[in-house]
Amino acid sequence: MVSNTSTIIEQSLDALLDDQSFLPELSGETRRKAFTSLTSILSTPNHIHKSFLRIALEDGKVTRIPAFRVQHNNIIGPYKGGIRFHESVEEEEVSNLAALMTLKNALHEVPFGGGKGGVVIDPRKFKVKELNQICRKYVQYFSQIIGPEKDIPAPDVGSGEREMDWMMGEYKSIHPGMKYRGSFTGKSVVNGGSLGRRQATGKGVYFSLRYMLHDFTKDKYKWLNERDNIFAKTVLNHKDKSLKIAIQGFGNVGSVVAAEANKCNFLNNKVVAVSDRNVTLHNSDGLDIPELIKYTKSNNGELPIDEESLEEANVKATICDRDDLLTMDTDILVMAALGGQIHQENMKQIKAKIIVEGANAPITGEADSYLSEKGIVVIPDILANAGGVIVSYFEWLQGRETQFYSEEQVYEKLYDKMQHTFETVYPQYFGDAFPLRQNCYIHSVMKLSTILFKQGKLY
Ligand code: NAD
């Protein structure tokens, strides 16, 4: 696994190796050996499962579709992570995303390990019956390695509630008489899904920003002012300012972030640009987010692409090229589309001073280092976009207890859990100038290492 994730895991372990106050029971040669073991455990997945799903297409042809399930680590609990349906899915990326899930769950104290799945298809090119067959075959092929206490998949890019319902149904047929509700999360509410699951990631992403710029800054204003820390200066420069937000991606995550920003009374912010796979829409006075959401709901999730459709949507905006959004003159950039969007070629043109990662790994390693050196605050994926897995955990719990929470209760519990993490990592970030991503990784790695050590797995 060669990626930003594995590099930061190694850097975090190097920092901890030198810190004798961490696991003081380990010293000298024993300590060095234990840390070598830790590096290999955390940098490699426990299992990589690969299969070819044999699917009969409606035109009579038969095709074999590559599919993966990577189980990275389960020291904290059953493997957990989404199944991505995308034509670019490949083993290495799925492995990196599985590792990120292990770290994310450890950071937010969700009692799950990390896993990830992928199916190499463009789901828009398949008929509904074919997709149903793909989902059911996925469960049949991996039926022995998934389950409520083993590995619990969820939706990811290209998959959603419908696919999770089909998959749970197939799991139930294959394992008659066994507990099945907790085998998949992200299901429809009628099938045991949690209220608020669809909104959870976007709500959490916006909360990570609001908590930093409002709650934390207000509470720690004097302390932040006294810090000789470039990130503290960036945040203070944005306090009480009128903030312009641009959001890349207007799907499940991006549209909820936009709606949250639009109704937030704590920050003086407006969404001035949004983009999707086709277009960027810009209005320096602020876009009409409720109208855009209404339009996308009845237009296959897509934003208006020309003057006629803007008029139909009743929205005033300038139509720009899709990637223009990234380099627009805004204060905050929310990444809610795909991985690898800010990279070596465009990192120097980024004008936003605060970036929030709703997508997983939207910034490459080089760009991440460059942005941090410039004092740009990056609220990383591991911290910001955990709302989905946190509410998935609530879904799993509700399925187990067959007791269901109201939508308000779900959000209250979500914010409590995320706030607990922010209270741990934000003071460290503004205190010692490690980038926030590394601070979060150090925290996760400490938790995982301690458990591995206490279970006698380091030798
Ligand atoms: P989605 O499919 O609902 O929306 C994706 C959006 O991105 C769409 O508007 C699409 O048009 C747009 N898009 C695609 N390519 C683009 C491009 N090149 N430029 C601009 N926009 C582009 O997906 P989602 O559920 O909103 O997830 C978005 C990201 O967040 C994904 O990377 C996903 O892995 C990550 N994420 C999602 C969740 C969740 O619970 N949904 C949880 C954690 C992480």
Image (cartoon, helix red, strand yellow):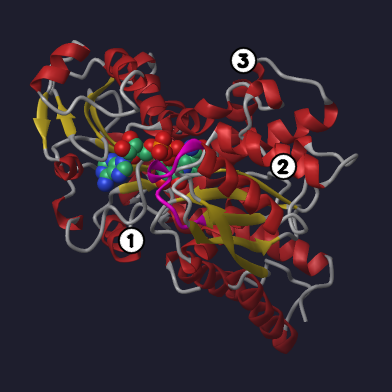
Q: Which dot, 1 or 2, sits closer to the camera?
A: 2
Secondary structure of the residue carrying tag 1 is loop
The amino acid at mark 1 is: Thr
Q: Quadrant of residue 4?
A: bottom left
Of the numbered discs in the image, which one, if any, rests on residue 170? 2
Q: Of marks 3 and 1, which one's residue comes earlier in the chain? A: 1
The amino acid at mark 3 is: Glu
Q: Secondary structure at mark 3?
A: helix
Direction from residue 400 to residue 196 in the image, left or right: left
Judged left or right of residue 357, residue 180 is: right
Which residue has dot 3 on it?
408
Q: Earlier in the sequence, mark 1 or mark 2?
A: 2
The answer to whether mark 2 is within 8 Å of ligand 1 is: no
Percent x, y for residue 118?
52, 56
Does residue 346 sit above or below 333 in this rendering?
A: below
Residue 394, magenta (yes or no): no
| Residue drawn where x is 48% and y is 45% of the image | 58
- The magenta segment is 119-128
Please tell me whether residue 421 is drawn above or below residue 207 in the rendered image: below
Which of label 2 and label 3 is nearer to you? 2
Visible in this render: residue 172?
Answer: yes
Which residue type does callout 2 highlight?
Glu
Disc 1 and disc 2: Cα gap in Å?
Answer: 38 Å
| Nearest to N terminus: mark 2 or mark 3 | 2
Question: Measuring 25% from the left and 27% from the top, which residue is drawn there?
Answer: 303
Residue 101 sits above or below residue 292 on the image:
below
The residue pinned by badge 1 equals 364
Q: Position of residue 377 (x, y in %)?
A: 33, 46
Between marks 3 and 1, how big is the CA–CA gap?
36 Å
